[in-house]
Protein backbone atom coordinates (compact mmCIF):
# COMPACT_ATOMS: atom_id res chain seq x y z
CA UNK A 1 0.00 0.00 0.00
CA UNK A 2 2.89 2.37 0.79
CA UNK A 3 4.30 1.88 -2.71
CA UNK A 4 0.97 2.89 -4.23
CA UNK A 5 0.92 6.04 -2.11
CA UNK A 6 4.51 6.87 -3.17
CA UNK A 7 3.56 6.46 -6.82
CA UNK A 8 0.44 8.58 -6.33
CA UNK A 9 2.46 11.28 -4.57
CA UNK A 10 5.03 11.31 -7.39
CA UNK A 11 2.26 11.70 -9.98
CA UNK A 12 0.69 14.55 -7.99
CA UNK A 13 4.07 16.29 -7.69
CA UNK A 14 4.58 15.93 -11.43
CA UNK A 15 1.17 17.48 -12.08
CA UNK A 16 1.87 20.33 -9.64
CA UNK A 17 5.22 21.01 -11.29
CA UNK A 18 3.59 20.95 -14.71
CA UNK A 19 0.90 23.39 -13.54
CA UNK A 20 3.57 25.73 -12.16
CA UNK A 21 5.56 25.53 -15.38
CA UNK A 22 2.50 26.25 -17.54
CA UNK A 23 1.39 29.14 -15.33
CA UNK A 24 4.83 30.76 -15.34
CA UNK A 25 5.21 30.10 -19.06
CA UNK A 26 2.01 32.08 -19.60
CA UNK A 27 2.85 34.93 -17.20
CA UNK A 28 6.52 35.56 -18.01
CA UNK A 29 5.92 37.08 -21.49
CA UNK A 30 3.33 39.44 -19.97
CA UNK A 31 5.78 40.49 -17.28
CA UNK A 32 8.52 40.95 -19.88
CA UNK A 33 6.33 43.30 -21.90
CA UNK A 34 5.40 45.25 -18.76
CA UNK A 35 9.08 45.55 -17.88
CA UNK A 36 9.91 46.73 -21.40
CA UNK A 37 7.12 49.30 -21.19
CA UNK A 38 8.46 50.48 -17.84
CA UNK A 39 11.99 50.79 -19.22
CA UNK A 40 10.65 52.83 -22.13
CA UNK A 41 8.80 55.13 -19.73
CA UNK A 42 11.96 55.46 -17.66
CA UNK A 43 13.94 56.53 -20.72
CA UNK A 44 11.20 59.02 -21.64
CA UNK A 45 11.35 60.32 -18.07
CA UNK A 46 15.12 60.74 -18.29
CA UNK A 47 14.72 62.71 -21.51
CA UNK A 48 11.98 64.87 -19.99
CA UNK A 49 14.12 65.49 -16.90
CA UNK A 50 17.05 66.51 -19.08
CA UNK A 51 14.75 68.90 -20.93
CA UNK A 52 13.41 70.24 -17.64
CA UNK A 53 16.90 70.84 -16.31
CA UNK A 54 17.81 72.71 -19.49
CA UNK A 55 14.66 74.86 -19.22
CA UNK A 56 15.40 75.53 -15.55
CA UNK A 57 18.96 76.56 -16.35
CA UNK A 58 17.72 78.86 -19.11
CA UNK A 59 15.12 80.34 -16.73
CA UNK A 60 17.73 80.90 -14.04
CA UNK A 61 19.99 82.60 -16.54
CA UNK A 62 17.18 84.80 -17.87
CA UNK A 63 16.23 85.73 -14.30
CA UNK A 64 19.82 86.57 -13.47
CA UNK A 65 20.15 88.70 -16.60
CA UNK A 66 16.81 90.40 -15.82
CA UNK A 67 17.90 91.20 -12.28
CA UNK A 68 21.19 92.58 -13.54
CA UNK A 69 19.44 94.72 -16.17
CA UNK A 70 16.99 95.97 -13.52
CA UNK A 71 19.84 96.92 -11.16
CA UNK A 72 21.74 98.62 -13.99
CA UNK A 73 18.63 100.58 -14.96
CA UNK A 74 17.94 101.51 -11.35
CA UNK A 75 21.48 102.86 -11.00
CA UNK A 76 21.10 104.95 -14.14
CA UNK A 77 19.78 108.34 -12.99
CA UNK A 78 18.60 109.27 -16.48
CA UNK A 79 16.37 106.16 -16.68
CA UNK A 80 15.05 106.74 -13.16
CA UNK A 81 14.15 110.32 -14.07
CA UNK A 82 12.52 109.24 -17.36
CA UNK A 83 10.48 106.62 -15.48
CA UNK A 84 9.23 109.19 -12.96
CA UNK A 85 8.25 111.53 -15.79
CA UNK A 86 6.17 108.79 -17.44
CA UNK A 87 4.29 107.85 -14.31
CA UNK A 88 6.86 105.67 -12.49
CA UNK A 89 5.38 102.32 -13.47
CA UNK A 90 8.31 100.97 -15.47
CA UNK A 91 10.42 99.97 -12.47
CA UNK A 92 7.38 98.57 -10.65
CA UNK A 93 6.53 96.39 -13.65
CA UNK A 94 10.16 95.29 -13.89
CA UNK A 95 10.22 94.36 -10.21
CA UNK A 96 6.97 92.39 -10.58
CA UNK A 97 8.36 90.55 -13.61
CA UNK A 98 11.50 89.68 -11.66
CA UNK A 99 9.41 88.38 -8.74
CA UNK A 100 7.24 86.37 -11.12
CA UNK A 101 10.38 84.98 -12.75
CA UNK A 102 11.77 84.03 -9.35
CA UNK A 103 8.58 82.18 -8.51
CA UNK A 104 8.64 80.44 -11.89
CA UNK A 105 12.25 79.35 -11.32
CA UNK A 106 11.31 78.07 -7.85
CA UNK A 107 8.40 76.09 -9.34
CA UNK A 108 10.78 74.72 -11.96
CA UNK A 109 13.28 73.66 -9.29
CA UNK A 110 10.52 71.87 -7.36
CA UNK A 111 9.33 70.18 -10.55
CA UNK A 112 12.86 69.03 -11.44
CA UNK A 113 13.42 67.73 -7.91
CA UNK A 114 10.10 65.86 -8.01
CA UNK A 115 11.00 64.47 -11.43
CA UNK A 116 14.35 63.25 -10.12
CA UNK A 117 12.61 61.48 -7.24
CA UNK A 118 10.07 59.85 -9.55
CA UNK A 119 12.88 58.79 -11.86
CA UNK A 120 14.83 57.24 -8.98
CA UNK A 121 11.69 55.42 -7.79
CA UNK A 122 11.02 54.19 -11.33
CA UNK A 123 14.59 52.94 -11.70
CA UNK A 124 14.25 51.09 -8.40
CA UNK A 125 10.97 49.51 -9.54
CA UNK A 126 12.57 48.44 -12.83
CA UNK A 127 15.47 46.90 -10.93
CA UNK A 128 13.11 44.99 -8.64
CA UNK A 129 11.06 43.91 -11.64
CA UNK A 130 14.14 42.54 -13.38
CA UNK A 131 15.08 40.57 -10.27
CA UNK A 132 11.58 39.14 -9.96
CA UNK A 133 11.48 38.26 -13.65
CA UNK A 134 14.82 36.48 -13.34
CA UNK A 135 13.46 34.59 -10.32
CA UNK A 136 10.33 33.63 -12.27
CA UNK A 137 12.46 32.32 -15.16
CA UNK A 138 14.57 30.21 -12.81
CA UNK A 139 11.44 28.94 -11.08
CA UNK A 140 9.97 27.98 -14.45
CA UNK A 141 13.11 25.95 -15.21
CA UNK A 142 12.88 24.29 -11.79
CA UNK A 143 9.22 23.43 -12.42
CA UNK A 144 10.14 21.96 -15.81
CA UNK A 145 12.86 19.83 -14.28
CA UNK A 146 10.47 18.81 -11.49
CA UNK A 147 7.89 17.79 -14.06
CA UNK A 148 10.40 15.57 -15.85
CA UNK A 149 11.81 14.07 -12.65
CA UNK A 150 8.47 13.48 -10.95
CA UNK A 151 6.97 12.27 -14.22
CA UNK A 152 9.73 9.71 -14.78
CA UNK A 153 9.80 8.57 -11.15
CA UNK A 154 6.45 6.73 -11.15
CA UNK A 155 7.36 5.04 -14.44
CA UNK A 156 10.71 3.86 -13.07
CA UNK A 157 9.30 2.82 -9.71
CA UNK A 158 6.35 1.12 -11.37
CA UNK A 159 8.77 -0.87 -13.51
CA UNK A 160 10.91 -1.92 -10.55
CA UNK A 161 7.94 -2.60 -8.29
CA UNK A 162 5.74 -4.26 -10.92
CA UNK A 163 5.56 -7.66 -9.22
CA UNK A 164 4.83 -6.35 -5.72
CA UNK A 165 2.33 -3.81 -7.08
CA UNK A 166 0.57 -6.55 -8.97
CA UNK A 167 0.20 -8.55 -5.77
CA UNK A 168 -1.17 -5.45 -3.98
CA UNK A 169 -3.96 -5.08 -6.51
CA UNK A 170 -4.76 -8.77 -6.93
CA UNK A 171 -5.21 -9.76 -3.53
Image (tube, grey):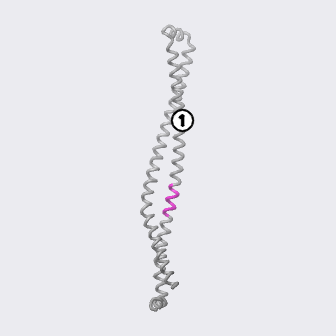
The residue sitting at 46% across, 86% down in the picture is 159
- Asked whether, in this view, residue 65 is left or right of residue 23, the answer is right
Q: What x and y, as percent, mark residue 35?
A: 46, 53
Q: What x and y, as percent, mark residue 129?
A: 50, 55
Front residue of 67/30: it is: 30
The residue sitting at 43% across, 51% down in the picture is 37
- Quick check: 139 above or below 112? below
Q: Secondary structure at mark 1?
A: helix
- Quick check: 157 above or below 171? above
The residue sitting at 56% across, 17% down in the picture is 72
Q: Main secondary structure of the magenta part?
A: helix
Q: Is residue 134 shown in magenta?
A: yes
Outermost residue toward the front in this view: 171
Q: What x and y, as percent, mark residue 147?
A: 46, 73
- Quick check: 98 above or below 169? above
Number of numbered labels in the structure image: 1
The residue to which callout 1 is attached is 110
Q: Residues within 10 Å of mark 1 (few under 14, many from 20)?
A: few
Which span of residues is magenta-colored? 129-137
The residue sitting at 51% across, 11% down in the picture is 88
Front residue of 86/73: it is: 86
- Quick check: 171 above or below 53? below
Q: What x and y, as percent, mark residue 156?
A: 48, 83
Amino acid sequence: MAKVLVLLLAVLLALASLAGYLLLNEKIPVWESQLAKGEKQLEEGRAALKEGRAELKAGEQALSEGKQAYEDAKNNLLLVLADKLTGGKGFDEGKQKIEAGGMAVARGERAVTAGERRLEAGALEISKGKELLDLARRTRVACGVGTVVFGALPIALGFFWRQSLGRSFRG
